[in-house]
Image (tube, grey):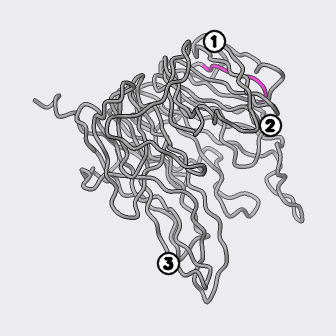
Amino acid sequence: MRRYFSIATVLAGVAIVCGVRAQARESKPTTGSDRPLWEIDLRQFGYERWLRRSTRPLPLFVDFTDVDHLAVGWIRPDIPHVDGRRAPLGPEPAHLNVVILDAKTGQKQSKTEWPTSARYFSAPLFFGIPDGRLLICSDNVLRLLSPTLEVVREQELPNHASCVNVAFQHSPSRRTLLVTILSEHSRQMELLGVETLAILSSWTEERAASATFMGILSISDHWLAGYCGEPTELCLRRFDKGWQPFHPNGFDTQMDKRQRIPVSFVSDEILVVERKTTGIVTVDGTVLFRIAPPEKHFLLLPATSAGGARFALIEDRFRGLRSEPLDMYPFQANDRALVYGIKDRRNIFSLKMKGTSPWTPWDVHDNYLALSPNGTHLAVLSDGVLKIYPLPSDSAEQH
C-alpha cells in the first residue's frame, strides 16, 4: 500500500510537503499487541532501501503463499547509481528478487532472482496463490513458482506486451487474474485462471475520447467493479453480463467530473466502498457495516483480504501545517495498520505505525501489509524490517 507526496520547499527550517489523496477509518479500533512473534531485517538478504540518492526508499512487496510461508520481493536496477547521470524515466534492466520465509520462525527457505525490465520504483505482479505457490511477472512472461521458487508454469503476455505496461488485478481468492493491455484506442482484457494460466474469458473495450467507460477498479471470481454511464457512476457486472449501476442501500454514490469512488473486493461478493464513511457492502447493495473516519484520518484502498473473512488496511492521517502564503500544506502519512472481521463487523486489531514526519520529510517511511490465508496473522513490512503479529479470534469462535 502506498501514499504519494512531493517536497515543495524548505523555508526557515520548516519542511514543506504537498499532499495528494484522501481516504477513511473507524473511530474506536481495538488496540492490538505491539509485540510481534518475530522480526527480521531484509538487508541480510541483499535489500537496500536507498539507491541513487533518491528521496524515496526502494519499494518492497510482501504476501503469504500459504499459512506457513510468506514471500518478500523487490526490484533492483542492474545499475544502482552512475555519478552525474539521473535515473532513466522509462524501463531499464533490473532483477526481481524473491525470498521465501517460514511464517512461524522467519527462517529463510529459498531465495532467487529473475531478470526483468522495470521502471524505477515500479510495482510488479507478485502474490501468493495461496497453496504455497507464487505468481510473478518478469520481462514479458507470467511465471507460476513452486514453494521452492522453481518454475511450475510460464506463459508469455499477449501481443508482445511487457510486464511494465500491463495492468494486473487479482481476485481476493487469488484464483483469478485480470490482465489489461492498453493501446491508443482500446483495452484488451484477458481473464486467466491462476493455477493453469489458461484464458477463461477475453474481450476488448474501446477507449473513446469522451471516456464514458472509465475502467475496471476491482475483480472477484465472478464480478467486476468499475465506472460506466454518462454521467459516470459506480457499476458492477458479472463477467458474462453487461454493466449495471451500483447503488448500495442508503449510500451516496454520486460523482462529479473530477471525483471517483474507490472500491475493492474483499471476498467474492463483498466490497469496500470509500466515501465520507467507508462502507462494507454486498453486490446486492446491502450495507453490512460502516467505518466512520475521525477528522483528518483516511483509509487506503485497496484492502488486503484473507479467505474472504478479514481484510487489512493502512490508516493515514494528515500531518503538517497549512499556510498558503508560505506554500505549506499538510500531507498524508501512514498512522496505523487495521484489520477488520467481516463476521464480527468491526475492527479486531489495530497497530500504531511510524509515518513520515512533516519536520523530517526526507526521512520517508513506507509500510506494507499482508494477511495469512486463514486470517490468523498479519505481516507488517516497515522500513525494510518484516514483523509478524498474531490476530485475535472472531467473537463467534470464542463462545
At horizontal 58% and vertical 33% (from top left) the residue drawn is: 229
**Residue type beneath disc 1:** Ser
Of badges 1 and 2, the one in the foreground is: 1
Query: Between marks 3 and 1, how big is the CA–CA gap?
Result: 50 Å
Who comes first in sequence, dot 3 or dot 2? 2
Who comes first in sequence, dot 3 or dot 1? 1
Residue 248: image quadrant is: top left
Query: Between marks 3 and 2, how big is the CA–CA gap?
Result: 40 Å
Q: Which residues are magenta?
A: 139-145
Furthest residue to the front? 230
Query: Between marks 1 and 2, how big is the CA–CA gap?
Result: 28 Å
The numbered mark at residue 117 is 2
Residue under label 3, please give it.
321
**Residue type beneath disc 2:** Ser
The numbered mark at residue 201 is 1
> Are discs 3 and 1 less than 8 Å apart at CB?
no
**Residue type beneath disc 3:** Leu
Vertically, is 258 above or below 145? below
Who comes first in sequence, dot 1 or dot 2? 2
Query: Few, some or many C-alpha atoms within 10 Å of disc 3 (few <14, some 14-19, many ≥20)?
Result: some
Which is more toward the observer, 357 or 106? 357
Which is more toward the observer, 146 or 202? 202
* Image location (x, y in percent) of residue 140: 78, 26
* Image location (x, y in percent) of residue 356: 52, 65
User: Is residue 307 in view?
Assistant: no
At horizontal 69% and vertical 28% (from top left) the residue drawn is: 137
